[in-house]
Image (cartoon, rainbow, N blue to C red):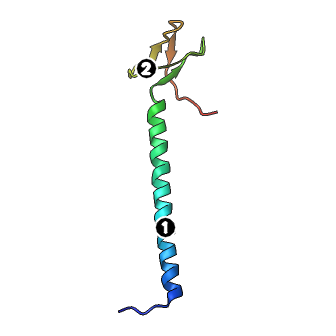
Amino acid sequence: MIQTSLTNLILFNLCGMLLLLGMLWAGRALRETLRERRRRRHKVVCGLCGHLFTNESKDLAVECPACEHMVPRQELLDL
């Protein structure tokens, strides 16, 4: 049996809980980042009329439904 004081036992428990909470927070932040990236993958903004639309095809250039202009697919920036 390992002998330890009450102070050390409390410190070990607090450090363990802090580590667990940190890991949960990091996992949730990573999952949210991946989910947002997946959501933005199919969104396209027309450079001519500014229309934001969703297109799930994998073509490099898609047609804008508002002005029928061919729009090159590019990554959306967060402003």
Q: How far is the residue under mark 2 from the one under mark 1?
A: 41 Å
Residue in view at x 51 percent, y 68 percent: 18
For label 2, the SS is loop
- Quadrant position of the C terminus in the picture: top right
Q: Earlier in the sequence, mark 2 or mark 1?
A: 1
Q: Amino acid at mark 2?
A: Asn
- Mark 2: few/some/many CA within 10 Å (<14, 14-19, 20+): some
Q: Is residue 19 above or below residue 42?
A: below
The residue sitting at the top extreme is: 68
Read off the residue under disc 2.
Answer: 55
Left or right of residue 79, residue 53 in this image? left
Residue in view at x 60 percent, y 11 percent: 49
Q: Is residue 74 above or below residue 36?
A: above
- Quadrant position of the N terminus in the picture: bottom left
- Mark 1: few/some/many CA within 10 Å (<14, 14-19, 20+): few
Q: Which disc number belongs to residue 67?
A: none
For label 1, the SS is helix
Q: How many marks?
A: 2
Q: Is residue 25 above or below residue 32?
A: below
Residue closer to the observer: 55 or 17: 17
Q: Looking at the image, do the residues carrying marks 2 and 1 touch, with CB atoms under 8 Å apart?
A: no
Residue in view at x 52 percent, y 29 percent: 75
Residue 65 rendering spot, x and y as whole percentages? 48, 10
Q: Amino acid at mark 1?
A: Leu
The residue sitting at the right extreme is: 79
Query: Nearer the observer, disc 2 or disc 1?
Result: 1
Residue 76 rendering spot, x and y as whole percentages? 55, 29
Q: Which disc number belongs to residue 19?
A: 1
Residue in view at x 50 percent, y 49 percent: 29
Residue 51 rendering spot, x and y as whole percentages? 56, 15
